[in-house]
Image (spheres, grey):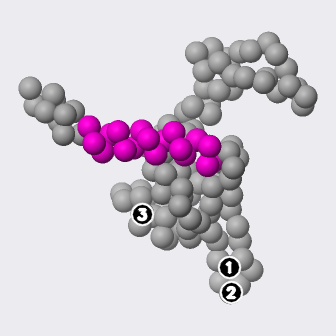
Amino acid sequence: MSTQVGAVGYPRRGDAFDSDCPARSVLDHVTSKWAVLVLVALRTEPMRFSRLRRAVGGVSEKMLAQTLRTLEGDGFVDREVVPTTPPQVSYSLTELGQGITGHLTGLIEWINVSVPDVLAVRRA
């Protein structure tokens, strides 16, 4: 991990290649299949849980809730509760979430375009 320390005692830059660096857990959280899909799904607008679940086909309620809690805990997703009856909860990207989602959107696009080539190699 970087030895430079920022103003609040956190490293200024991580080193994901260092097994002791917190960057490893961030990498793990944002690159899980469900996290990537949730973050990219939220890139254009906030969504309520049920709409987000429909947008991310195949994710269970339990896994979506767990993924959202993790992303919220890391500061990538904001959870807003509107005090209505019943309460309405919506999820949106934070500034940090918007920053990583730009990169993940490119990854998803590359995969979508390249999947025929990958399948052809698998068949060969």
Image quadrant holding the C terminus, namely top left
Assess disc 2: are there few (<14), some (14-19) or many (≥20) residues with their C-alpha within 10 Å of its C-alpha. Answer: few
Which segment did they paint magenta?
97-114
Magenta stretch: residue 111 in it?
Answer: yes
Q: Position of residue 55 (x, y in %)?
A: 42, 63
Q: Is residue 3 left or right of residue 36?
A: right
Q: Does residue 64 sit above or below 24 in this rendering?
A: below
Q: Nearer the viewer, mark 3 or mark 1?
A: 3
Measure the C-alpha gap from mark 3 to mark 1: 21 Å
Helix, strand or loop at label 1? It is loop
Residue ID for mark 3: 55
**Residue at mark 2:** 85
Residue drawn where x is 65% and y is 18% of the image: 15
Residue 67 colored in magenta in the image = no
The quarter holding residue 121 reads top left
Residue 62 seen in this snapshot: no
Q: Amino acid at mark 2?
A: Thr
Q: Quick check: marks 1 and 2 in contact, CB under 8 Å?
A: yes
Relative height, residue 41 to residue 36 (above, below): below
Which one is in front, 71 or 106?
106
Please report the residue visible at 16 percent of the width from the left and 30 percent of the height from the top: 122
Q: Residue 119 occupies which quadrant of the picture? A: top left
Instruction: First in sequence, mark 3 or 1: give its number.
Output: 3
119 shown above or below 6? below
In x, y percent, where is residue 21?
68, 20
| Residue type marked 3 | Ala
Residue farthest along the bottom direction in this orientation = 85
The disc placed on residue 87 is 1
Give the CA separation, mark 1 to mark 2: 5 Å
Q: Residue at x 21, y 33 (%)?
A: 118
Q: Secondary structure at mark 2?
A: loop
Q: Is residue 20 at least partly visible in the picture? A: yes
